[in-house]
Image (cartoon, rainbow, N blue to C red):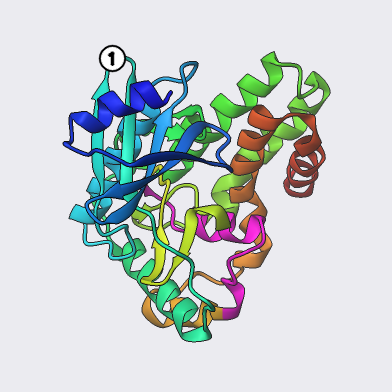
Amino acid sequence: MPDILRNLLESLDMEPGQIIPVQGGDINDSFRLTGVEDSHWFVKINRPDQPKEIITTEYHGLEMMRSAGVRMLPREIRYAEYSDFACLIMPYDEKPDRIGRSDWADYVRHLAGMHLTSRAVFGGEDNFIGSLPQVNTAKNNWISVYRENRLAPQWERARVAELISSRYTSNWHRFLNRLPDVMPVERPALVHGDLWSGNVLITREGIMLIDPCPYFGHREMDLAMMQLFSGVPVQEFLNEYENIYPLSPGLADRIGCYQLYYLLVHLNLFGATYFPAVRRIIESFS
């Protein structure tokens, strides 16, 4: 992999002193570059068994977010491709000694500002969530997006892999039929798409968003993902969010509907340990 990476870096006139593997990625390979332009860089490259479009669409998503005025992004992003590989490069930022309440309040306010960014229809450029394709075909109705472009592909993938039994089919259809009564109608919002704590990067320069799979969707998708896995204290600062972009009442009662998508993704990526959570949500809303 370093030989391929050096070819990619040469196309950007970057000559690192060292290429150091970084642990933690489930989908791509990651490295730290030292001795380049008097600074350190983080680089992510697709693995041989994964399509380079995983990296390509992430780069396009970051650039789209920057063009839309999103402020919480790495200050510089570079991209290169070579043969069947692509890499994404950004500054390697050190973690701060501490992060205060004011930092989280700023983060939540910026998130609300990002969600205020809208357009006429839902959707965007097709991309990936993890290694799984995410279709973002333009639609006028969020419920159609969520049923057809989010839940249905993940459910079918899990069913074919025998991660879900056919005996849950009736509950599944009842759940789908309830969605229009549960999810409030809103205009399309620019969402990060995969906003778990690992993609909220805390640095000395502030909190940044990384690894997005963005599209124009329902903003409560981001809020649901932040609350699904611990690490982002969104509930504590939700009033800061609502001062900028108020929510419809009852988010806590419907948040599982949005979390189901992410749990199905985890079921397909990581296996049957996620099925009990999937089942609980389907049964509770059906």
Q: Nearer the viewer, residue 284 or 118?
A: 118
Please identify the quarter of the rendering in which residue 261 is found. Answer: top right
Position of residue 222 in the picture relative to residue 268 (left or right): left
In the rendered view, tell whether residue 110 sits above or below residue 16.
Answer: below
Position of residue 153 in the picture relative to residue 42 (left or right): right
In the rendered view, tell whether residue 15 sits above or below residue 155.
Answer: below
Q: How many marks?
A: 1
- SS label for mark 1: loop
Query: As drawn, which residue projects farthest toward the front?
Result: 17
Residue 23 at what x, y percent from top left? 57, 42
Q: In which quadrant of the rendered image does the C terminus lie? A: top right
Is residue 139 visible in this depiction of the protein? no
In the rendered view, tell whether residue 64 sits above or below residue 84.
Answer: below
Q: Nearer the viewer, residue 238 or 23?
A: 23
Query: Measuring 65% from the left and 43% from the top, which residue is drawn there?
Result: 260
Q: Which residue is mark 1?
A: 83
Q: Amino acid at mark 1?
A: Ser
Residue 100 at what x, y percent from top left? 52, 83
Q: Nearer the viewer, residue 179 or 101?
A: 101
Residue 60 at what x, y percent from top left? 26, 39
Query: Measuring 62% from the left and 49% from the top, which residue is drawn there?
Result: 259
In the rendered view, tell whether residue 102 sits above or below residue 162.
Answer: below
* Residues rendered magenta in the picture: 215-236
Residue 226 sits inside the magenta stretch: yes
Query: Measuring 27% from the left and 28% from the top, which residue is drawn there?
Result: 8
